[in-house]
Amino acid sequence: MGKKRHFTGKMVVGEDEGREFAFESNTERLVALVMLARHDVTNVENQVLFNWVDRAGKARKHFFDFRITLRDGTRIAVVVKAPHKATDAEFRMELSWLASQVTPDFAHRVSLMTANDLDPVEIYNAGLIHSVREPDPEPDAAVRRVIAAIAGPVKIADVVDASGWPGRGFRSVVRLVRSRELELADPGRIEPESRVRRRII
């Protein structure tokens, strides 16, 4: 507030009461949603403090926007910037100097992300997945009974019809994608005509 084109906010992520994530740009919000939805990501930390020393020898503090942990144990410290800032030579030199001081006990690598790195389809699916994070026990149970009997890919619309919960059943299917019980059989937006299958472990 009080500044043109300045976007800040907070959102709740995770199970039950969840965790509060603060963000200082819409791109940060979108990166968080996308990372939380990716199946190869097991943990997302927000605003992670890192102590470093600048070129003049002065001790400095930097808060990485995110630290992502992948399923294989790799940890990535993420800096989110607007595209025009990410190409600034002075900024890139400073980030390179900072990244050179990051050790494996903190992160295995540093990644710079902009809005240009985000796929619009992945953004859409991530937002949908986040929107259904609260359980709905009856349709969730009905959808689980349906998918227990399927073999191979099946249209979401067919699962919803078989569950007997129109509308809420669709949200339950998306919730099972979120919980890794189901996965999309084909790339694209999660829609009633999309196909899902039981996740192959």
Image (cartoon, rainbow, N blue to C red):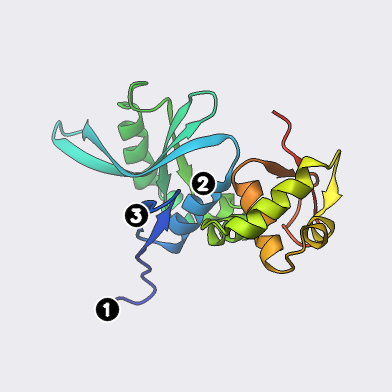
**Amino acid type at image mark 1:** Gly
Q: Nearer the viewer, residue 65 or 189?
A: 189
x, y (%) of residue 136? 57, 59
Which quadrant is the N terminus positioned in? bottom left
Q: Where is mark 2, residue-wise? A: 36
Residue 76 pos. (x, y %): 44, 33
Q: Where is residue 182 drawn, in percent x and y? A: 70, 43
Q: Nearer the viewer, mark 1 or mark 2?
A: 2
Q: Where's residue 123, x and y in %?
A: 60, 57
Packing grade of label 2 (10 A; few <14, some 14-19, many >=20) is many
Which sits earlier in the primary sequence, circle 1 or circle 2? 1
Q: Residue at x 43, y 55 (%)?
A: 28
Whether residue 112 appears in this view of the structure is yes
The circle drawn on residue 135 is: none
Q: Say whether residue 114 is visible.
A: no
| Nearer-N-terminus badge (2/3) | 3
Which disc number belongs to residue 2? 1
Under mark 3, the amino acid is Glu
Mark 1: few, some, or many residues within 10 Å (few <14, many ≥20)?
Answer: few
